[in-house]
Amino acid sequence: MITHGKNIKVFSASANPELAKSIANIVGVPVGNSCARLFSDGEIGVDINETVRGSDVFLVQSTSYPVNQHLMELLIMIDAFKRASAGRITAVIPYFGYARQDRKAKARDPISAKLVADLLTTAGADRVLTMDLHAPQIQGFFNIPVDHLLGAPIIAPYFQEKFKGMEDEVVVVSPDLGSVTRARKFAEKLDATIAIIDKRRPKPNVSEVMNIIGDIKDKRIILVDDMIDTAGTICNGAQALMDRGAKEVYACATHAVLSGPAIERLEKAPIKELVLLDTIELPKEKQLDKITTLSVANVFADAIERIYDDVAISPLFS
């Protein structure tokens, strides 16, 4: 049985055009001819200007700011491909928005991540390719295959080279209890020890450091997280680590959400270097000297080729 379309086509919506172009170049195909537009009342319209009949379509779109516009654009383009008889449609979502709303934290909370999963499936997506979901169990919200890539195999080699010969001085720090597993796996790649910041959130997007578990005195610290939004967690953590005797603090994350006061906080924070991936396009006004951006294009291109060829994606995790 044929489980994919007759040829690969990579399309881009408006959130990640440069990343989509890089992915397409590596795969060896041009970016598909399409465009999205806004009507005067704010409705979204799309044009698919080439045939996709029978093709294996990969649509690249992060649901980053403006989240609702990018999400609707993604859904409408998927619907257009389905109605144009695409052989298979893969939603390539480097950053999956609404992933933080993955459970009922209190009475009458929505589970928005499940709603978005249902919307993607109903629109016509046959599978999803994403990276570093805020909550990995979101894969179970889908009734279609979800390929969940990891950012650590891209970031870890960068720090391995930077701290070559200084491994004994490096400590990988989890900024909260929820990121301990991520920090432990990252530390294993660097052959480093780990420490944990115990924090509390008195309200959304506000964090307070309570304790630091582990030895960080006179150490080179790498704070590891999946995303940086308002940067309160990472900046407060960096300051607490320096106050408690750390030699220097670095930070890394997969998704550069960087909303609200994030840039101002990062400028003032005692973070020597912040390493981010380009799952979210970083505008020029947010490109600080201390920010280093690494590309995910190679990993996504490899995953796309493996999906098309029905080859296992798990080797990309190592």
Image (spheres, rainbow, N blue to C red):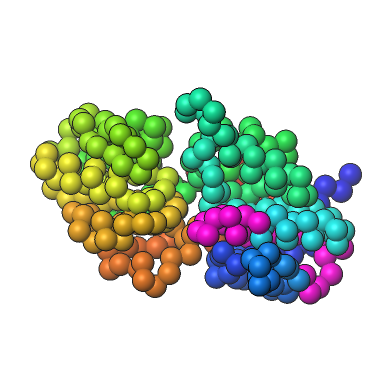
The percent coordinates of residue 70 (x first, y second) are 60, 59
Q: Nearer the viewer, residue 310 or 253?
A: 253
The mark total stands at: 0
Residue positioned 17% across, 33% down in the render: 215
- Please name whichever residue, 16 or 276, is drawn nearer the observer in this view of the structure: 16
- Residue at point 39%, 73% (across, down): 284
Relative placement, left or right, of 121 versus 115 is: right
Q: Which residue is situated farthest in the top direction here?
A: 107
Is-magenta flag for residue 60? yes
Q: Position of residue 266 (x, y in %)?
A: 27, 57
In this rendered view, identify the residue nearer to me: 290 or 118: 118
The N terminus - image quarter: top right
Q: Choose top left, top right, bottom left or bottom right for residue 33.
A: bottom right
User: Residue at image x 21%, y 31%?
Assistant: 210
User: Horizontal placement of 241 versus 105: left or right?
Assistant: left
Q: Is residue 273 visible?
A: no
Residue 28 among magenta residues: no
Residue at 82% x, 65% y is 52
Residue 111 visible to the viewer? yes
Residue 90 percent location from the top left of the image? 71, 52
**Left or right of residue 40, residue 202 in this image:** left
Q: Give whichever of 249, 45 is nearer the camera.
A: 45
Q: Left or right: 6 with respect to 248?
A: right
Which image quadrant for residue 102?
A: top right
Residue 243: image quadrant is top left
Magenta segment range?
48-72
